[in-house]
Image: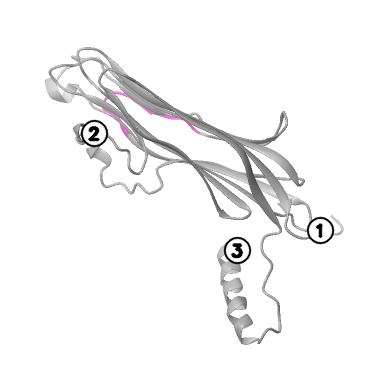
Amino acid sequence: MRYRRWLLLAGLVLSLGSAAVGAADAPPGPAYKIVLRSRHAEVTPTRTREAQTGGGSIIVEQPEPNTVVVTMRGSAVAGSDCSASDAAMNFILEQEVDIVPTRDGVRPPRIGLVGRVVGTLQVTDPCKFCGKDCKPCGSAEQGPAAACLSVGDAIVLSIGVASSAVSCGQESAINFRDGPVETPAVPGCYRLAGSFHIGASQGKGVWHRQAAVADFDPAPELDAFWADALKPFRAVPRGEFGFKVVLRVVEDAPAVVGK
């Protein structure tokens, strides 16, 4: 609510500024900015037999000078065949950043970090086809989804979004978050590291096709063959699918006198 109120007041100030005939300067921008430096981002898919991975991306964006958003997305699906099959994707990011003041006379920075995982997990129930426990079943999982900000070997902030898994006949829509966490800091060089894992495995089954799905991509780029496996969550909004990490730096609040 305070943030929305601040946005409203800022909009009113900007509107009044145009009518003030230059009587006041434009409001200053963020006191600190994040400068992106070297990066190592890697997605490793693995597949065996009747399985497929789709998507697989690590996107680093900077919507504002003092904010960095990292999004990891992908999907893994495994189907039944004469033999068991599995698919997985592993995401790793190491991003060097500098936190730099944008003007003189600012208070020390305060850094915040938050993480969120959105997607779906599902596994076919083989018993609905034959009425008994006749075939090996599968599993689908997400996590660990973790990120940390460090200086050298010292971790400054860290988040770890809860892992989850489903098995035979289970379906789950995931929307987990960890944070925000925050701490006072100093300008300088930092390293933002993140990792994420998704996986699906399925036992063999020739006569009654089964599937296990870990879907964490808005557009998973899977073959049409898997359309039936994706049906249970077809109507779910997919725009926020993936593991998202937000790093933000602001000027710290002034010290309270007498406390």
Give the Cα separation between the discs numbered 2 and 3: 46 Å
**What's the residue at 19%, 35% (across, down)?**
228
**What's the residue at 81%, 58% (across, down)?**
256
According to the picture, the residue beneath numbered tag 3 turns out to be 2
Classify the position of the N terminus by image quarter: bottom right
Question: Whole-percent x and y of residue 142?
Answer: 42, 30
According to the picture, the residue beneath numbered tag 2 turns out to be 223
Give the Cα separation between the discs numbered 1 and 3: 19 Å
User: At label 1, which amino acid type do we have?
Assistant: Val
> Mark 2 or mark 1, which has the lower sequence index?
2
Question: Whole-percent x and y of residue 251?
Answer: 72, 56
Q: Report if residue 146 is visible in the image.
A: no
In magenta, the rendered stretch is 162-171
Magenta stretch, overall SS: loop
Give the Cα separation between the discs numbered 2 and 1: 59 Å
Above or below residue 76? Residue 113 is: below
User: At label 2, which amino acid type do we have?
Assistant: Asp
**What's the residue at 41%, 47% (across, down)?**
240
Dot 3: within a 10 Å radius of its alpha carbon, few (fewer than 14), some, or many (20 or more) residues? Answer: few
Q: Secondary structure at mark 1?
A: loop
> Mark 2 or mark 3, which has the lower sequence index?
3
* Mark toward the viewer: 2 or 3: 2
> Mark 1 or mark 3, which has the lower sequence index?
3
Q: Report if residue 16 is visible in the image.
A: yes
